[in-house]
Image (cartoon, rainbow, N blue to C red):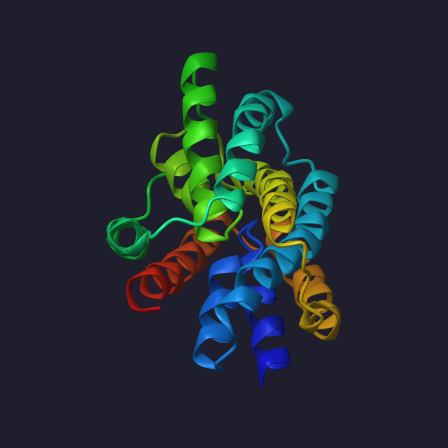
């Protein structure tokens, strides 16, 4: 059941340039895996799927280095810090979950119009990157679940470009968060190896579909589903 869930999550999330950490966490929690196993497993699977999604969206011509580099530069050390810390985040998770659910409703009911957009000023990018990096490390996600709706609502770029940037953002932050986690625990869960093939297969199929076949309106509808899953996960697990 967990292998099938990982495949489905990787497929759905990679369609919108995400890697699936919040979905993996929800599935592993429902199936009773230990908390000490869930966070590093989600980050490791994130790295695999985000690598594939980054390559697929970049190959399709949607990536923007100008938008990506300041966000990533500020986020990586903060994601490491978030992965290293072990803080009680119950109230924080409820607040973030409600924000994600409201974003999901907006994308489902009234998706923002497509726009070429204008990347934010460097100080804004650095601030957003640092904040999202810390969030990604604390929650065990790659940060794209927060970056994509923010970038679309603020019209920083077109939908598929933001998806491409989010995939790369998730990759660097998941790697940084996992390194931070391993630096504290010195342990790596063996269950990752049995789930890796399902994640790679789902991520390959989903990211190809999202980067080359799906229109931007379909991606926004799928993003609403992804945000809803992530929001419910934060609220109820």
The image shows residue 189 at horizontal and vertical percentages of 67, 67
Q: Is residue 38 above or below residue 220?
A: below
Residue 7 visible at all: yes
Residue at 69% over, 64% down = 205
Q: Is residue 155 above or below residue 49?
A: above
Q: Is residue 147 above or below residue 198?
A: above
Q: Is residue 73 above or below residue 42?
A: above
Residue 176 location, quadrant: top right
Residue 6 location, quadrant: bottom right
Q: Position of 170 compared to 132: left or right?
A: right
Q: Position of 151 compared to 98: left or right?
A: right
Quadrant including the C terminus: bottom left
Quadrant including the N terminus: bottom right
Residue at 49% over, 36% down = 133
Residue at 58% over, 40% down = 173
Return the residue nearer the eye: 194 or 157: 194
Return the residue nearer the eye: 95 or 198: 95
Return the residue nearer the eye: 101 or 217: 101
The image shows residue 159 at horizontal and vertical percentages of 49, 40
Return the residue nearer the eye: 28 or 128: 28
The image shows residue 66 at horizontal and vertical percentages of 59, 20
């Amino acid at each position: 059941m967990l292998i099938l869930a990982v495949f489905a999550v990787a497929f759905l999330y990679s369609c919108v340039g995400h890697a699936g950490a919040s979905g993996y966490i929800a599935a592993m929690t429902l199936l009773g895996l230990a908390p000490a196993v869930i966070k590093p497993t989600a980050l490791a699977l994130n790295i695999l799927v985000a690598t594939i999604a980054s390559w697929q969206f970049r190959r399709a011509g949607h990536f923007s280095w100008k938008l990506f580099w300041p966000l990533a530069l500020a986020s990586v050390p903060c994601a490491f810090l978030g992965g290293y810390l072990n803080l009680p985040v119950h109230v924080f998770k409820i607040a973030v979950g409600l924000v994600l659910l409201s974003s999901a409703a907006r994308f489902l009911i009234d998706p923002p119009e497509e726009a070429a957009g204008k990347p934010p000023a460097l100080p804004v990018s650095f601030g957003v990157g640092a904040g999202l990096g810390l969030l990604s490390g604390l929650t065990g996600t790659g940060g794209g679940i927060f970056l994509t709706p923010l970038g679309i609502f603020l019209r920083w770029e077109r939908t598929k470009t933001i998806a491409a940037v989010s995939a790369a953002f998730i990759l660097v932050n998941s790697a940084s968060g996992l390194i931070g986690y391993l630096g504290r625990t010195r342990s790596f869960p063996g269950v990752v190896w049995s789930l890796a093939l399902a994640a790679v297969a789902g991520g390959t199929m989903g990211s190809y579909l999202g980067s080359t076949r799906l229109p931007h309106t379909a991606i926004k509808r799928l993003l609403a589903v992804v945000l809803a899953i992530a929001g419910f996960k934060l609220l109820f697990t």
